Image: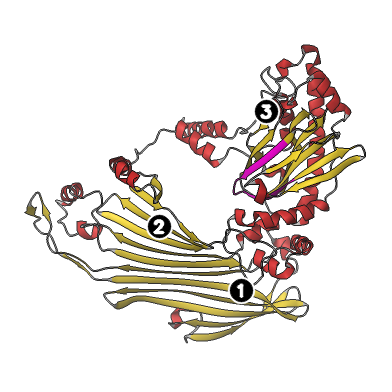
């Protein structure tokens, strides 16, 4: 018996592969058509050179934007995006234009159900404030819909929905973050640099790059009067050699020109291999992690009015502070303006690894106001069997803290370690606590050689059942951890 | 190093460069090397702070030639690229403004260069 499933799977895979194949082609020179083996007439000398070079060092696959474009062009949407955002956008375009001096960007959400207006951000030094207003497609909330008798619910909800205005569901938000616009090695270490935007650190990191480059082995230099260059100029004379088309070169000389391009590219490849091997060993790649470990602070606040039938108003605020314990600020503290010290530190990170310790503090508070709805009318008549809504104020507080670091104290030749973590949630409804769970632990890990350590933990929970194996809110655990010396052999093979 | 262009120019011509990197370029630097009768010598080092604002310039001397090469430290896993505006004030108005893709295959530091031959 022949089943259809495998055929359908193959068909799906085949169809899926079409756009993928279309988007994974290299983005720049047409390396296929400009292959040195048989370059097309309209290929430039530069494209032929690139075709040889990119065989050894291919370009990245297509960018995300290219993929999105290709997928958009190749796929037919199964669900048509909502027209709400575009309709509101076009209706109020003229009004928004009046405020163009204050509006930074107006964008429609991907599903078409919300229009977001971002106002010009306010920046003062390293303080950054962004304001936005979001107009979302108003909905009848379940809180209201569930009060309508089930038999009439779909039609009544549709009618209520039709009576909602464009601006019934509006959210106003403000986001504050701390981000330095620039940072330097000479800035006092007491003045921290904030944020993770590479542009803020580019200038200071470039001096490290120069110092690392000074140590790099020289590549195979091609002198301006190298015989290869001289011959290329002789065969294809022009101001801009690489922009010329191969068809502009005398037919008898084309093979020789392509041969020279091959040799130039081969020397470039050889040089890149030497330098790549060097740079990979220097630990310079750790700079990316150091930027990503820079402190980041953001606070956001929002207020949402979901409209007449959208349920209670919502007010929220959240705070996030995080940083890796080894970051550029730490390196500035250690090295000051001595970039040779930074180069040595990078080499040490390359050898011993970069500590992954992080400090994370996140907290959010959300409050829903009272919501009452005593009557509901459709087509001018009250709905039979409607149950009035009387939802009381409720709130939710969540927080998480995580911190750990190696201590200066050394035991058996290794540093002791301290870790702290706390996690919790509290919810209230009508002033009465409905959920309350808070757990915290502090752990001191004392090493006893390479494979053994003693972790000593102090644990606290607001209720003992939140802790495993404890009958009291506060407890102490003392353990012994032993890593098998042959555990590496037991580890699954890496892919 | 991959060459972006080879130009045949006269002494006295000015070369200008400005750059615009994307966020996957952590940092970069442009070295200018002068080829004298005795060999290559460092001529100038150009840093992002100036390259991205007013740009940098060089007037070609009566030497064998020049290498202008860019060294970029790229973010692992990113799609690094720099948009250059490389202009030579020769009669042809030679420019190079193609986007410079900096692929992961050459990371962590990718090098690109323009070679100028003085005739």
Outermost residue to the left: A381
Which residue lies under the disc numbered 2? Answer: A131
**Horizontal placement of A269 versus B20: left or right?**
right
Classify mark 1: helix, strand or loop: strand
Q: Taking A271 as reference, is A260 above or below it?
A: above
Residue A404, disc: 1
Q: In percent of the image, x 38 and y 55: which residue is there?
A: A132
Which residue lies under the disc numbered 3? Answer: B93
Mark 2 on the same chain as mark 1: yes
* Contact check, label 3 and label 1, Cβ < 8 Å: no
Badge 1: how crowded within 10 Å, few (<14), some, or many (20+)?
Answer: many
Q: The numbered mark 1 sits on a residue in which chain?
A: A
Query: Real-space Cα distance between discs 3 and 1?
Result: 59 Å
Residue A450 is situated, as x and y percent measured from the top left of the image, at 75, 73
Residue B69 sits in which quadrant?
top right
Q: In percent of the image, x 81 and y 31: which residue is there?
A: B117
Q: The numbered mark 2 sits on a residue in which chain?
A: A
Q: In percent of the image, x 77 and y 51: which residue is there?
A: A279
Front residue (pair A59, A190): A190
Classify mark 3: helix, strand or loop: loop
């Amino acid at each position: 018996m022949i089943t259809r499933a495998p055929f359908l799977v193959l068909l799906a895979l085949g169809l899926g592969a079409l756009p993928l194949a279309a988007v994974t082609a290299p983005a720049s020179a047409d390396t296929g058509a400009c292959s040195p083996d048989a370059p097309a007439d309209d290929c430039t000398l530069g494209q032929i050179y690139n075709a040889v070079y990119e065989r050894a060092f291919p370009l990245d696959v297509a960018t995300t934007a290219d993929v999105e474009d290709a997928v958009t062009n190749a796929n037919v949407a199964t669900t048509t995006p909502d027209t709400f955002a575009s309709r509101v956008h076009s209706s109020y375009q003229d009004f928004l234009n009046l405020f163009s001096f204050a509006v930074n960007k107006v964008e429609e959400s991907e599903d078409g159900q919300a229009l977001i207006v971002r106002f010009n951000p306010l920046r003062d030094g390293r303080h950054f404030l962004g304001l936005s207003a979001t107009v979302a497609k108003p909905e009848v909330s379940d809180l209201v819909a569930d009060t309508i008798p089930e038999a009439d619910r779909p039609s009544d909800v549709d009618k209520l929905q039709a009576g909602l205005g464009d601006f019934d569901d509006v959210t106003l938000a403000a986001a504050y973050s701390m981000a330095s616009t620039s940072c330097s090695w000479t800035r006092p270490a007491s003045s921290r640099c904030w944020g993770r935007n590479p542009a803020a650190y580019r200038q200071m990191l470039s001096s490290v790059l120069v110092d690392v480059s000074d140590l790099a082995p020289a590549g195979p230099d091609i002198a301006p009067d190298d015989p290869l260059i001289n011959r290329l100029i002789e065969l294809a004379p022009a101001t801009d050699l690489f922009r010329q088309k191969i068809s502009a070169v005398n037919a008898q000389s084309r093979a020789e020109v392509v041969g020279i391009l091959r040799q130039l590219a081969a020397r470039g490849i050889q040089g890149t291999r030497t330098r790549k091997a060097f740079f990979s060993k220097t630990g310079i790649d750790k700079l990316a992690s150091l930027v990503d470990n820079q402190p980041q602070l953001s606070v956001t606040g929002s207020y949402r009015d979901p409209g007449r039938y959208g349920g209670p108003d919502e007010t929220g605020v959240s705070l996030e502070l995080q940083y890796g314990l080894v970051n550029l600020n730490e390196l500035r503290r250690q090295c000051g303006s001595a970039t040779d010290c930074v180069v040595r530190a990078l080499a040490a990170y390359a050898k011993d690894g970069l500590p992954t310790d992080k400090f994370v503090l996140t907290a959010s508070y959300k409050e829903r106001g009272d919501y009452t709805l005593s009557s509901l009318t459709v087509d001018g008549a009250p709905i039979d069997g409607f149950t009035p809504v009387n939802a009381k104020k409720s709130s939710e507080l969540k927080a998480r803290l995580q911190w750990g670091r190696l201590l200066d104290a050394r035991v058996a030749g290794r540093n002791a370690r301290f870790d702290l973590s706390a996690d919790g949630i509290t919810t209230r409804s009508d002033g009465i606590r409905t959920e309350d769970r808070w757990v915290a632990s502090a752990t001191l890990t004392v090493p006893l050689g390479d494979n053994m350590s003693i972790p000593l933990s102090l644990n606290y929970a607001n209720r003992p059942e939140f802790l495993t194996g404890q009958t009291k809110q506060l407890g102490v655990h003392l353990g012994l951890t032993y890593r098998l010396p042959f555990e590496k052999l037991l580890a699954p093979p890496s892919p | 190093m991959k060459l972006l262009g080879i130009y045949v120019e006269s002494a006295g011509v000015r070369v200008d460069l400005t750059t615009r990197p994307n966020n996957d370029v952590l940092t970069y630097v442009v070295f200018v090397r002068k080829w004298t009768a005795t060999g290559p010598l460092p001529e100038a080092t150009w840093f992002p702070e100036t390259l991205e604002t007013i740009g940098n310039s060089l007037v070609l001397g009566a030497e064998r030639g020049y290498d202008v090469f860019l060294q970029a430290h790229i973010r692992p896993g990113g799609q690094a690229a720099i948009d250059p505006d490389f202009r030579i004030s020769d009669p042809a108005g030679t420019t190079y403004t193609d986007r410079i893709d900096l692929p992961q295959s050459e990371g962590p530091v990718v090098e690109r260069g323009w070679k100028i031959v003085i005739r």
